[in-house]
Amino acid sequence: EFPQAALLLPTLRNDEALLLNIITLCCHWVVSDFNPLSALSTLAGFTSPCNSADIPAARSTCTLLRGRAIFPQLLQASVGQVLKPHAAPVLARFWDAVLGTPPQSMDDSAHLASALSAIANDAALESSLTLMITGLHARSKETLPAAR
């Protein structure tokens, strides 16, 4: 119905000043815990390609985000959202876009490795994973077909 809608994110990405402002604002919102899931969803949208022709621009945006000094705090703050209701799909999309995108340069690789190292021993991540694994074990032991 709206064929031009698919062009919105690539068009916004072309305005470098606007893109930097959006990234800065979203990072601030996540780190300060002000509507973080919406901000993470916005960041995931800008770092995910809309189509195959958009892959280089999305990867470039991802590299730009990972190169920001606040990126390790952003990643850590995203881990803190795990226990919030309805966070799983947003976090999955954000982590897939930002952590799943291959590094585009040696600097990008170093930024990504540094941020991942910062959260490797995070207590919130460990407790969230423990809770998730406990829930999955409980579901695997359910015998009633209706419970599955």
Image (cartoon, grey):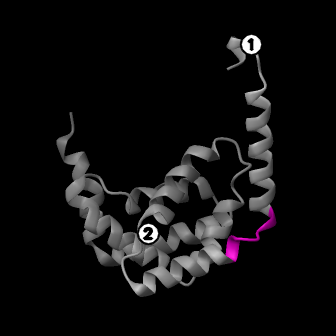
Locate the N terminus and report the quarter of the image it occupies: top left
Instruction: Return the residue nearer the eye: 76 or 105.
Output: 105
Residue at the spot 77% in from the left edge and 36% down from the top edge: 137
Between 123 and 30, the one nearer to me in the picture: 123
> Where residue 99 appears, x then y in whole percent?
50, 65
Residue under label 2: 22
Q: Seen in the image, is 54 located left or right of residue 47?
A: left
CA neighbours of label 1 inside 10 A, class few (<14), some (14 to 19), many (20+)? few
Q: Which residue is mark 1?
A: 144
Residue at figure coordinates x 56%, y 78% from the top left: 113
Earlier sequence position, callout 1 versus callout 2: 2
- Image location (x, y in percent) of residue 30: 61, 65
Residue type marked 2: Ile
The secondary structure type at the circle numbered 1 is: loop
Q: Look at discs 1 and 2 and give the one toward the viewer.
A: 1
The image quadrant where one finds the C terminus is top right
* Residue 40 is inside the magenta segment: no
